[in-house]
Image: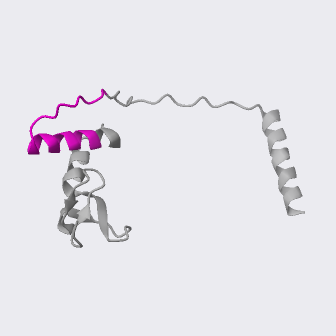
Amino acid sequence: MTEDEKRCSLCLQNRPPDSFHRDAQKKDGLSSWCKDCSKFRGDHPELSIAQVKLARCENMAEETEGPSEVESPPFAPKSPEKAPRARRQLTPEQRYARNEARRAARAAKKA
């Protein structure tokens, strides 16, 4: 890798700086993913980062050498709806006791 190249953290290829989006929050001012990987991720939002990385590497292998002999493990798709966490309902007496305990702890902390 030369000084004027950067390594994409997703496809692990060395690329010229103009193939990365600008990112002011990064030390070098460039995104950690190349534009091709960013586009691929944008086209497939349902995939996790690990799935994107695997699919992107497989696509690159097919482009360069043909199909790979390694079988990829099946991924379980993320469930579109997450079950909400059950929230415990407190009675007014329980809330009062909880708040009193918190007030006492704060008063002890100040003293």
Q: Nearer the viewer, residue 71 or 108?
A: 71
For the point 21% across and 70% down, the residue is 2
Specify whether residue 103 is painted magenta. no
Taking 41 as reference, is 35 above or below it?
below
Taking 85 as reference, is 32 above or below it?
below
Q: Where residue 87 sits: x, y (%)? A: 63, 31
For the point 80% across and 41% down, the residue is 98
Look at the image and tell me in which quarter the N terminus lies.
bottom left
The image quarter in which residue 60 lies: top left
Taking 41 as reference, is 68 above or below it?
above
Q: Where residue 106 sits: x, y (%)? A: 83, 56
Q: Nearer the viewer, residue 93 or 70?
A: 70
Q: Where residue 20 sits: x, y (%)? A: 23, 63
Kindly tell me whether residue 83 is visible in this rendering: yes
The coloring applied to the image is: one colour
Kindly tell me whether residue 45 is visible in this rendering: no
Q: Where residue 5 sits: x, y (%)? A: 22, 67
Please state if 79 lies on the left or on the right of 18 as rendered: right
- What span is colored magenta in the figure? 53-74
For the point 89% across and 56% down, the residue is 108
Q: Which of 13 and 91 is in front in this view?
A: 13
Taking 16 as reference, is 12 above or below it?
above
The image quarter in which residue 45 lies: top left
Please state if 35 lies on the left or on the right of 45 as rendered: left
